[in-house]
């Protein structure tokens, strides 16, 4: 019997599973920031994972009709690749590893795999809408439980497009560092999504879109936080780099405006001294505003803009 469990603790979420499908203590542990598994799953492009699910289904169908173990081996290799892409798919891998080890791979399971992409894409849309309508602090405020009460009748959503909560296999036991709490023993990927969303509601944790990368992040600390600390491909955190970038952009914008304003005042004084007509000033002003806009957008450098102001 394979092992897979998930639990939340402090500002993190933890997964423990046996990658070899044998019963006993979990052989692998994975720790992520709170809500990272759900948020990263919602950001997955189906075109990156759906072909692999369909390939696994085709392999299972071929194995069922021919009995050739090469097909079941290739199916597990494909599901293993999926599991490496996201922790949710590791659950799928373990389920089929156990079935293969027990010799109960059946043709009916092919249809289960073929239907999975449509189900997961539906869950993605429903959970995304939940974030927007229930958890997004900038759209609906920080009263998460109040938002939930307004959108659900007991466990059923008023809007069928919202995620629907269902019973999930949750137990209670010892987690990390000998503390105790709820532990999920999921049967499906849907269980993982459900467990994460209800944790946000229970703990009144809203989300916000990062002002730098635009991705959602959970607000587990200061409610005024604008930048996320989520993992990125660059290895840099928006919370560390974005304020510096914002300061640099603001400073550059101030320099552009100062150069523009200085030349504006100088040219405007020329009208009074008779060196410029109002028509000439208006034409210059129009061109200067266009140049300033290009400089603000970094289409030209500050030095190039200063040179243009001087020579225009």
Image (cartoon, helix red, strand yellow):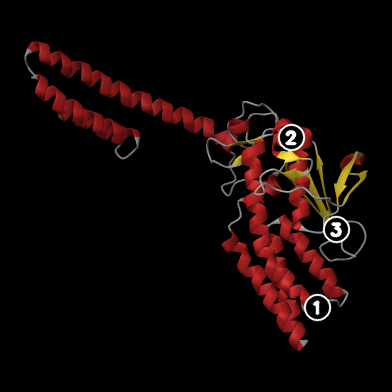
Residue 162 or 209: which is nearer the viewer?
162
| Mark 1, secondary structure of its residue | loop
Q: State if disc 3 and disc 2 touch (CB < 8 Å).
A: no
Q: Earlier in the sequence, mark 2 or mark 1?
A: 1
The percent coordinates of residue 163 (x first, y second) are 70, 48
* Furthest residue toward top: 272
Residue at mark 2 to residue at mark 1: CA–CA distance = 43 Å
The nearer-to-camera label among 2 and 1 is 2
On screen, 115 above or below 233?
below
What residue sits 77% from the left and 42% below the top?
198
What residue sits 86% from the left and 78% below the top?
103
Give the residue pinned by disc 2.
149
Count neighbours of disc 2 (C-alpha within 10 A) and say few if under 14, some if 14 to 19, many if 20 or more.
Answer: few
- The image quadrant of residue 270 is top left
Q: Earlier in the sequence, mark 2 or mark 3?
A: 3
Q: Is residue 241 left or right of residue 124?
A: left
Q: In this orientation, does residue 118 appear?
A: yes
Give the residue pinned by disc 3.
27
* Furthest residue toward left: 274
On screen, 68 above or below 105?
below
Q: Earlier in the sequence, mark 1 or mark 3?
A: 3
Give the residue pinned by disc 1.
106
């Amino acid at each position: 019997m394979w092992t897979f469990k998930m639990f939340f603790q402090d500002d993190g979420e933890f997964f423990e599973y046996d990658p070899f499908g044998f019963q006993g203590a979990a052989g692998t542990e994975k720790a992520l920031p709170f809500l990272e598994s759900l948020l990263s799953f919602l950001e997955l492009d189906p075109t990156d994972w759906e072909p692999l699910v369909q390939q696994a289904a085709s392999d299972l169908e071929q194995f069922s009709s021919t009995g050739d173990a090469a097909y079941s081996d290739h199916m597990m290799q494909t599901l293993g690749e999926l599991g490496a892409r996201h922790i949710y798919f590791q659950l799928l891998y373990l389920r089929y590893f156990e079935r293969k080890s027990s010799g109960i791979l059946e043709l009916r399971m092919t249809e289960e795999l073929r239907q999975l992409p449509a189900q997961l894409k539906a869950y993605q849309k429903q959970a995304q809408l939940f974030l927007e309508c229930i958890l997004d602090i900038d759209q609906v405020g920080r009263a998460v439980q109040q938002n939930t009460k307004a959108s659900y009748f007991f466990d059923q959503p008023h809007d069928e497009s919202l995620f629907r909560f269902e019973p999930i296999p949750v137990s209670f036991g010892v987690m990390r560092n000998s503390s105790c709490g709820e532990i999920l023993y999921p049967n499906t990927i849907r269980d993982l999504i459900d467990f994460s969303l209800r944790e946000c509601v229970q703990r009144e944790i809203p989300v916000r879109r990062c002002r730098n990368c635009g991705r959602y992040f959970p607000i587990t600390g200061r409610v005024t936080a604008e930048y996320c600390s989520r993992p990125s491909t660059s290895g840099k955190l928006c919370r560390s780099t974005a304020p510096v970038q914002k300061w640099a952009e603001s400073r550059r914008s101030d320099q552009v405006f100062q150069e523009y304003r200085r030349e504006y005042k100088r040219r405007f004084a020329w009208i009074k001294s008779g060196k410029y007509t109002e028509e000439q000033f208006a034409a210059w002003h129009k061109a200067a505003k266009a140049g300033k806009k290009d400089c603000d957008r970094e289409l030209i450098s500050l030095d190039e803009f200063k040179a243009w102001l001087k020579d225009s």
